[in-house]
Structure formats: structure tokens, C-alpha cells
Image: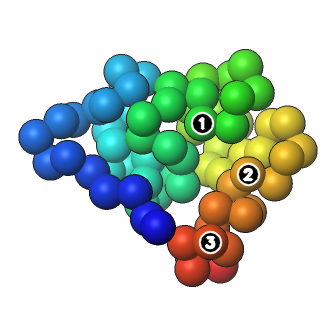
């Protein structure tokens, strides 16, 4: 099931990336500052490593995109 965004909350995990952008642009978990638990916070991956970078090789991004019907 696709997570939804509480429109009253701008950034649920306080990682300086808006929930909407995490869900619909970067395919991250808006409730976790480090969506893939690889030690690199989402803001860092987005800012310095590009979109949808799988830094730990666990296919988290690819699998989530498939599950969400985005690939």
C-alpha cells in the first residue's frame, strides 16, 4: 500500500526534504530520515548522490518503484 502524506505536516522525519517530494519524486520513506538504513541520510543522497541512488546495494529503490507501480 502506498504511504500517504499528512498535508498538515511538511517534513515528518525532519530531514529537510518535504514529505511530498520524498514520496513522489525521490521514492523515499517520509517517516525515516535514512529510508534505506545505509547510514547516509536522505537529504545527503538526494543532494550529493543524485536521484534514486541505492548506496548500499539492497535494491530498495528499485523494489519500491516496482511495488508502487512506478517502473
Q: Is residue 64 above or below residue 54?
A: below
Q: Secondary structure at mark 2?
A: helix
Q: Quadrant of the C terminus?
A: bottom right
Residue on which the image places disc 1? 35
Q: Are marks 1 and 2 in contact (CB under 8 Å)?
A: yes
Q: Is residue 25 left or right of residue 62?
A: left
Name the outermost residue toward the right.
Answer: 57
The image quadrant of residue 37 is: top right
- Which residue is drawn at the image coordinates 73% and 46% (left, top)? 53
- N-terminal label among 2 and 3: 2
Q: Which residue is mark 3?
A: 67
Horizontal side of 26 relative to 67 (left or right) equals: left
Q: Which mark is residue 15?
A: none
Q: Quadrant of residue 10?
A: top left
At which x and y percent is residue 6? Answer: 20, 46
Is residue 20 visible in the rendered structure shown here?
yes
Q: Position of residue 56 (x, y in %)?
A: 85, 36
User: What residue sits 69% from the left and 23% below the top?
Assistant: 40
Circle 2 residue: 60
Secondary structure of residue under mark 1: loop
Q: Residue 23: image x %, image y %?
A: 43, 54
Q: Residues within 10 Å of mark 2 (few under 14, many from 20)?
A: some
Instruction: Judge from the rendering whether residue 9 lies leftward or rightward of residue 61; answer left or right.
Output: left
Amino acid at each position: 500500500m502506498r504511504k500517504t502524506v499528512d498535508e498538515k505536516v511538511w517534513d515528518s522525519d525532519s530531514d529537510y526534504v518535504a514529505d511530498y517530494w520524498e514520496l513522489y519524486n525521490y521514492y523515499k520513506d517520509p517517516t525515516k530520515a535514512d529510508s534505506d538504513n545505509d547510514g547516509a541520510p536522505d537529504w545527503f543522497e538526494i543532494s550529493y548522490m543524485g536521484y534514486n541512488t541505492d548506496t548500499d546495494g539492497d535494491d530498495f529503490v528499485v523494489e519500491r518503484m516496482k511495488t508502487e507501480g512506478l517502473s
